[in-house]
Amino acid sequence: MSLRIALLGLLAEHPYSGYDMMKMFDTSLANVWPATQSQLYGELNKLAGGGQVTVSAEGPRGRKEYALTDLGRAELHAWLRDDSQEQVHRSELLLRTFFLGELDPAEAEAVLGRVAERATENLALLSQLDSEIDWDGGDLAVYGRLTLEFGKRLRAMQAEWASWAVAQLRSRSS
Amino acid sequence: MSLRIALLGLLAEHPYSGYDMMKMFDTSLANVWPATQSQLYGELNKLAGGGQVTVSAEGPRGRKEYALTDLGRAELHAWLRDDSQEQVHRSELLLRTFFLGELDPAEAEAVLGRVAERATENLALLSQLDSEIDWDGGDLAVYGRLTLEFGKRLRAMQAEWASWAVAQLRSRSS
DNA sequence: TCTAGCATGTAAACAGTTACATGATTGC
DNA sequence: GCAATCATGTAACTGTTTACATGCTAGA
C-alpha cells in the first residue's frame, strides 16, 4: 500500500514520469521506501486505471508524465492523517542478536563490533548528505530534513547500543 | 529467508512443535520477526524436506516435534556470522514524515505529536516487559536482554525525535 | 555511426497476509 | 457432553525481487 503513497506523494509536488521518479527512489527515497523499477511502473498503471493520477503529457521515447488528480490527493491526505495502523517492524539485526548465543562469545562480540562500525560509517554518510543538500525553502526540504535527522539519530543510537552490548558481553565473560 | 532462520534459531536451543514456536512468535519474537501461523507451518515443512530439521517426536492431535539437524545448525551459524547483506529498511513513519508538507502545519504537528505519544507508551510497555521477565542464566536470556534494550532505546529515540520535530515546525511557523 | 542513457514494460519466483478448514483432546 | 485450546494445514491474494525484453534518441 505504501509504495502507492510514495508515488502519490512525489506527484503531489510536481508532475513526473516513472523514470524521473525511479531516480528519486534511488536517491532521496532510498532510505525511506525503496522500490524497484518493475514495481513502480506497475503501480503507476494501477493508479492511472483507478483515476488517482493521469497522464498529463507524453514525450519522446514513450515518456509519460503523470499528474496527481483530486482523487489521488484526497487519498494521499487521508493516508497521511491516518496513523492508526501500527507498522510491523522486522529487523534482521535483532534476529541476529537474539540468536547470537549460538556462536561462541568471541564471534558474537565481533559481529556486534561490526554493527557499531557500520552504524558509525553510515552516520558519517548521512551527515555528509545533510551538508551537501541545500535546504532552501519548500515543504519537501523541511520535511526531508526531519526525515534525514531521524536517520542520523537512528544510526547514532545503533552505534551506541552495539558498543554497549559488546561491553556487556565482556563484563559477563570475565 | 529470515523466517527460516528464526525457526532454526528457536530449535537450536530445544526441540519444539510448530504450535510451540507460534506462541514464541506471538511473544518474545513479536517485536523482532513477526510471522503468521500459515507461514510457519509451510516453512517447517520446507526445512524438514531439505533436511535442516527432523521430526523428533510425534504426540497427540497430530503434534510433530521438530529438532535441528547438523545441517540446520551449520546453516544457522553461517547466517549469524554473515552480516554482509545490509537489510533494506522500509519505514512508514519516515514516508509519512517525508510527505507531511501536504497537510497544513497544524495537522502535521498533530501527527508528529501522536508519534511521540505512541513511542513513549511503547517504551513503557517494553520497560514493563523487561521488569517482568526473569533474566536468569541461559544464552537466550543474555541476548534477549540485548534485543529488548535495543527496542527501548529505539522508542526513546523516536519520542525525542518527534518532540524535536514538533519544536522545529513551531519555530518555523512563527 | 555508435554508445550511453532515456524510457517502459512483462514474467517468474519468493515472501507475507488473511481467511478458511478440519479434527483431536483435556478438563469441567 | 461441551467448551476451550491444542494442532496442522490449504487457498487466494498482495507485495517485492530478479531477470529479461524492447526500442528510442541525443550527443560525441
Image (cartoon, coloured by chain):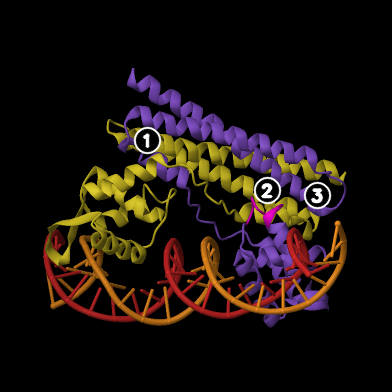
Chain colours: A purple, B yellow, C red, D orange
The residue that label 1 is drawn on is B143
The residue that label 3 is drawn on is A141
Name above or below for residue A90 compared with residue C12. above
Q: Amino acid at mark 1?
A: Tyr
User: In x, y percent, where is residue A161?
Assistant: 51, 31
Q: Secondary structure at mark 2?
A: helix
The residue that label 2 is drawn on is B113
User: Is residue A7 or residue C12 the one in the foreground?
Assistant: C12
Residue shown at the point (52%, 45%) measured from the top left = B122
Q: Which residues are magenta?
A: A26-33
| Foreground disc of the pair 3, 2 | 3
The answer to whether residue A127 is left or right of residue D2 is: right
Tell me the distance, in whole angstroms, between the alpha carbons under discs 1 and 2.
Answer: 33 Å
- Residue B128 image-quadrant placement: top left
The answer to whether residue C20 is left or right of residue B163 is: left
Circle 1 chain: B
Q: Secondary structure at mark 3?
A: helix
Main SS of the magenta part reads loop
Counting the numbered discs, the total is 3
Is B133 included in the stretch rendered in magenta? no
Q: Earlier in the sequence, mark 1 or mark 2?
A: 2
Name above or below for residue A51 compared with residue B152. below
Q: Is residue B148 visible?
A: yes
Q: Amino acid at mark 2?
A: Gly
The answer to whether residue A120 is left or right of residue A133 is: left
Name above or below for residue A133 compared with residue A74. above
